[in-house]
Image: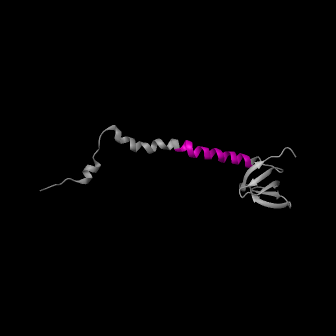
Amino acid sequence: MIVTTSFAFWAAAPTGGAGSSLPMLLPLLLIPVLYLVMIRPQQKRQKEWQLMLSSIKAGDRVTTAGGIRGIILSIKDDVIVIRVAPDNIKLEVAKSAIASVTTDNAQ
């Protein structure tokens, strides 16, 4: 009894048919979907945040990433000095720590 059938031969043999290429192409088809759903919205938020940081000025009300709210007193390169109520404490925070800006034109 001589059985010389190699498993590697059968594993490497093409299965034939066009339906077998779909599972191989599926990851390539998902890349544009992932870009539209995940990457592009994050890039848009990043651009809006950079624009917000570049447009801040003294007198704007800001909220930091830690939740501290205050009014901008001065802006240096990457440091912002804010005044925090109720005791008018001056805090120096990194510019990148600013989460949101509210301009108050009513004052």
x%, y% of residue 36? 56, 42
Q: Nearer the viewer, residue 49 or 65?
A: 65
Q: Is residue 26 visible?
A: yes
In the rendered view, tell whether residue 76 sits above or below residue 103: below
Query: Is 49 colored magenta in this rendering?
Result: yes
Quadrant in which the N terminus appears: bottom left
> In screen coordinates, is 8 left or right of 64?
left
In the rendered view, tell whether residue 89 sits above or below residue 40: below
> In screen coordinates, is 77 left or right of 21?
right
> What span is colored magenta in the figure?
34-53
x%, y% of residue 30? 48, 43
Q: Quadrant of residue 3?
A: bottom left
Query: Is 47 colored magenta in this rendering?
Result: yes
In the rendered view, tell whether residue 90 sits above or below residue 32: below
Q: Quadrant of residue 78?
A: bottom right
**Which residue is depicted at the point 65% across and 46% down?**
45
> In screen coordinates, is 90 left or right of 4?
right
x%, y% of residue 72? 81, 54
**Which residue is depicted at the point 39% across and 41% down?**
22
